Image: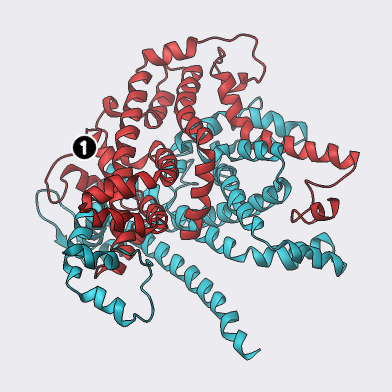
C-alpha cells in the first residue's frame, strides 16, 4: 500500500509520513487557502460589517449588519443585479443554442469548406473584445447587415456573446462521440433534420451542456469591455460595471461597495461550486484545444 | 428514397480532413448528397457565423481599414497610408505602453506558471481534504475581474494600516504605496494577475501530472534518483506540452490586458501602468483618434497571432521529432 502511495504524486509531499511532516503539511495548506481564498473571505465577512475605511477590515466582526445591502439597494444595486441576470440568462440561453446548432453541423455533416469554418471559429478566439474595442463600438451603434443600433440596450451585451468559439468547439468534440446508429434509426423512421437534431442528438448532449453552461455563465458574468461599450447610462449597467461607479461616488461608503462586490461575486462562485465537475472537465478539454 | 444513402453521409467524421480520402469518402464528398449536406450545415452554422461576422470579422476589417485612414465622422475618411502607425511609434506614450504590456504579460505568465506549478506539486493527491483545498485555491479564477479589482484596491490600501501593509509589516517590510506609487504600481498589478492566474495554471498542471506514467517514478526510485532529479528528468519533461498550452493561452490573454488596469490604476500613476489597450481605449474613445487607436490594436493583434503561431510551430516541430527518429532506431 505505502509502496504504491510513494509514487502517487510527483513530489510525494501530500503522502509523506511522520508527525513533523503532518504539521508542515497543514501549515502549507493553510497558507495556500489564506493567500488565495482569504481575500474573498474578507470580502464576504466585511460586507456584513459597518466598515467605513480600508483599514477597518476584520475577519472576526464585532457586529453583523445588513445595513450595507440596504444602502446598496438604495443606490440602485438591485437594478444592476437584475440587468446582470437578464444578460447572463438570455446570453447563456442563446449561446448554448447557437453552440449546439453549429456543433451539429460541424460534428455530423461533411461538407466542402468545413476546414475553413473551423479555422474561422478558431480565429475568433484570437479576436477578443478588448482588441476590437474601437471598431466594435462603431459596429454596435450600426450593426452590419441589419443596421440596428444596439448601444444603450441590454441586447447589445447579449447578442455578441451568443457565439463563442470555445463553446462551439467543446460541443463539437462531444457530439462526434454520439453513436450514429441512433441517428440512422431516426432517419429510417423518416425523421427530418430538425427532428433528429431536437429529439435525438440534443437529449444525448446533456452532459456536455453542463460543461458549456458553466463556462458560458462565468464568461458572460465576467464580461466588462462589451457592457462598457454598449451602456449609455447607469440604467443599463451590469453589476460588475457598476462597481467602479459606486467606488468613485463620494457618497457611497466602503461598506456599500463591498456589499455590491459580494453580490457580483456570489452568482459565479455558486454556479462554479454547483457544477465543479463539469467545470473541471471543460477546463482540461478546453485547454488542450487552446 | 433518401434514407438508403443517408446512413453513409450521416456518419460522423473527424474534424481534421483525413489525409488520404479513399474512394468511398471522395464519393461522399462530391456525391448527390453533398449539396444537401452543405445546405443543412449552412442553416445550422448560420447563427454562429453571422454573429461572428458582425461582431468579430467586420470589426477586424474595419480596424485594418481605419488604421490606414484619418477617421473623420460625417466628413468621410481620408487615406493616410502608414501615417497612423508612424504617429503611434513616434508618440511618447506608445513605447512605454508596449514595454509595460510586455513586462506584465511575461511576468504574469511566468509568475502564474511557477506559482501554479508549486501549488500543483504541493496539492497533488486524491485525498478528499486536498480536493477541498484546491477548490478554495481555485476560487479567484471564477470571480469576475471587476470584483477582484475592488477587493485588491482595498487590501492594497497604501496607508500603514492597510491590510497587506500590516501583514508585511509583521516581517519588517513595507509599508508600500502599491498602486499609488509609480515605483510599485506595475508590480502590484502583476501580483494581482498572478494571484488570479496561478490557480488556473495549477488545475491544468494537475491534469497534466495525472497523466504522468507512475512506473517512471518507480523506475527513477529504483535507479536511486532524488526527488529533485525525478522532478527534473521525469515530471517536467512530461509536462512540456502543458507548459506550451499555458504559455500560448497566457500570452494571448496577457497582451490584450485591459480590465485589470482600467479598474486598478487606469494607467496611472503618471503612466506607470499604461498598457497598449488602456492607451488605445483613451485614444479611441476619449480623444476620438480612431485611426491611430486602430493602428495600435492591429499591431497588438499581429503580435498575438505571431506569438501564437510561433508557439504552435515550435510545439509541432518538437512533437514531430521523435516520430521521425523512431523508425531509424
Q: Which residue is mark 1?
A: A151
User: Looking at the image, which residue is at 19% across and 39% down?
Assistant: A150
Is B324 situated above or below B288?
below
Is A241 situated above or below A252?
below
Residue B150 image point, x, y percent:
50, 31
Q: Is residue A49 left or right of residue B21?
A: right
Could one spot residue A106 in this view of the protein? yes
Q: Which chain is red?
A: A
Q: Nearer the viewer, residue B177 or A193?
A: A193
Residue A77 image point, x, y percent:
38, 20
Q: Which chain is cyan?
A: B
Q: Which residue sits furthest left?
A: B75
Residue A255 image point, x, y percent:
51, 17
Quarter of the figure with residue A207: top left
User: Looking at the image, which residue is at 62% across and 33% down?
Assistant: A37
Q: Nearer the viewer, residue B130 or B59?
A: B130
Could one spot residue B90 in this view of the protein? no
Report the number of discs: 1
Is B147 situated above or below A67?
below
User: Looking at the image, which residue is at 49% across and 40% down?
Assistant: B269
Q: Local crowd at mark 1 within 10 Å, few (<14), some, or many (≥20)?
A: many
Quarter of the figure with residue B43: bottom left
Amino acid at each position: 500500500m505505502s509502496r504504491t502511495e510513494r509514487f502517487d504524486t510527483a513530489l510525494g509531499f501530500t503522502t509523506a509520513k511522520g508527525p513533523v511532516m503532518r504539521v508542515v503539511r497543514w501549515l502549507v495548506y493553510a497558507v495556500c487557502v489564506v493567500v488565495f481564498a482569504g481575500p474573498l473571505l474578507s470580502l464576504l465577512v466585511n460586507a456584513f460589517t459597518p466598515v467605513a475605511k480600508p483599514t477597518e477590515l476584520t475577519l472576526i466582526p464585532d457586529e453583523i449588519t445588513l445595513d450595507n445591502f440596504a444602502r446598496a439597494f438604495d443606490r440602485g444595486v438591485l437594478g444592476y443585479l437584475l440587468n446582470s441576470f437578464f444578460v447572463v440568462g438570455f446570453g447563456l440561453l442563446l449561446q448554448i443554442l447557437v453552440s449546439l446548432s453549429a456543433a451539429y453541423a460541424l460534428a455530423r455533416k461533411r461538407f466542402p469548406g468545413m476546414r475553413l469554418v473551423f479555422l474561422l471559429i478558431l480565429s475568433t478566439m484570437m479576436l477578443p473584445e478588448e482588441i476590437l474595442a474601437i471598431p466594435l463600438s462603431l459596429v454596435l451603434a450600426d450593426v452590419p447587415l441589419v443596421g440596428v443600433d444596439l448601444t444603450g440596450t441590454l441586447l447589445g451585451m447579449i447578442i455578441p456573446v451568443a457565439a463563442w468559439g470555445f463553446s462551439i468547439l467543446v460541443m463539437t468534440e462531444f457530439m462526434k462521440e454520439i453513436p450514429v446508429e441512433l441517428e440512422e434509426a431516426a432517419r429510417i423512421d423518416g425523421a427530418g433534420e430538425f427532428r433528429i437534431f431536437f429529439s435525438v442528438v440534443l437529449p444525448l448532449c446533456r452532459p456536455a451542456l453542463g460543461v458549456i453552461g458553466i463556462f458560458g455563465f462565468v464568461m458572460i458574468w465576467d464580461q466588462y469591455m462589451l457592457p462598457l461599450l454598449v451602456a449609455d447610462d447607469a440604467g443599463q449597467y451590469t453589476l460588475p460595471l457598476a462597481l467602479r461607479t459606486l467606488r468613485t461616488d463620494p457618497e457611497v461608503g466602503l461598506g456599500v461597495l463591498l456589499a455590491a462586490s459580494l453580490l457580483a461575486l456570489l452568482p459565479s462562485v455558486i454556479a462554479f461550486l454547483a457544477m465543479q465537475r463539469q467545470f473541471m472537465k471543460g477546463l482540461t478539454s478546453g485547454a488542450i484545444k487552446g | 428514397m433518401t434514407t438508403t444513402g443517408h446512413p453513409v453521409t450521416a456518419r460522423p467524421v473527424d474534424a481534421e480532413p483525413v489525409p488520404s480520402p479513399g474512394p468511398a469518402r471522395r464519393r461522399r464528398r462530391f456525391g448527390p448528397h453533398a449539396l444537401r449536406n452543405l445546405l443543412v450545415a449552412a442553416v445550422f452554422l448560420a447563427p454562429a457565423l453571422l454573429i461572428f461576422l458582425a461582431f468579430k470579422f467586420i470589426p477586424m476589417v474595419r480596424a485594418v481599414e481605419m488604421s490606414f485612414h484619418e477617421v473623420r465622422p460625417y466628413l468621410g475618411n481620408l487615406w493616410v497610408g502608414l501615417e497612423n502607425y508612424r504617429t503611434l511609434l513616434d508618440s511618447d506614450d506608445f513605447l512605454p505602453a508596449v514595454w509595460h504590456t510586455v513586462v506584465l504579460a511575461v511576468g504574469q505568465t511566468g509568475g502564474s506558471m511557477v506559482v501554479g506549478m508549486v501549488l500543483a506539486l504541493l496539492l497533488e493527491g486524491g485525498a478528499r481534504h486536498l480536493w477541498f483545498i484546491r477548490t478554495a485555491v481555485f476560487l479567484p479564477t471564477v470571480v469576475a475581474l471587476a470584483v477582484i479589482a475592488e477587493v485588491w484596491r482595498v487590501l492594497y490600501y497604501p496607508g500603514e494600516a492597510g491590510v497587506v501593509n500590516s501583514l508585511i509589516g509583521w516581517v519588517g517590510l513595507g509599508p508600500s504605496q502599491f498602486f499609488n506609487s509609480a515605483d510599485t504600481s506595475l508590480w502590484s498589478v502583476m501580483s494581482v494577475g498572478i494571484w488570479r492566474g496561478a490557480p488556473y495554471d495549477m488545475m491544468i498542471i494537475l491534469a497534466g501530472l495525472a497523466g504522468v506514467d507512475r512506473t517512471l517514478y518507480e523506475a527513477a526510485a529504483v535507479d536511486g534518483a532524488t526527488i529533485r532529479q525525478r522532478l527534473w528528468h521525469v515530471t517536467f519533461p512530461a509536462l512540456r506540452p502543458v507548459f506550451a498550452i499555458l504559455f500560448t493561452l497566457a500570452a494571448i490573454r496577457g497582451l490584450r490586458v485591459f480590465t485589470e488596469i482600467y479598474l486598478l490604476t487606469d494607467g496611472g500613476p503618471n503612466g506607470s501602468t499604461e498598457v497598449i489597450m488602456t492607451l488605445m481605449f483613451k485614444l479611441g474613445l476619449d480623444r476620438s483618434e480612431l485611426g491611430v487607436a486602430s493602428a495600435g490594436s492591429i499591431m497588438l493583434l499581429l503580435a498575438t497571432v505571431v506569438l501564437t503561431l510561433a508557439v504552435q510551430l515550435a510545439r509541432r516541430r518538437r512533437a514531430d521529432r521523435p516520430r521521425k527518429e523512431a523508425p531509424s532506431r
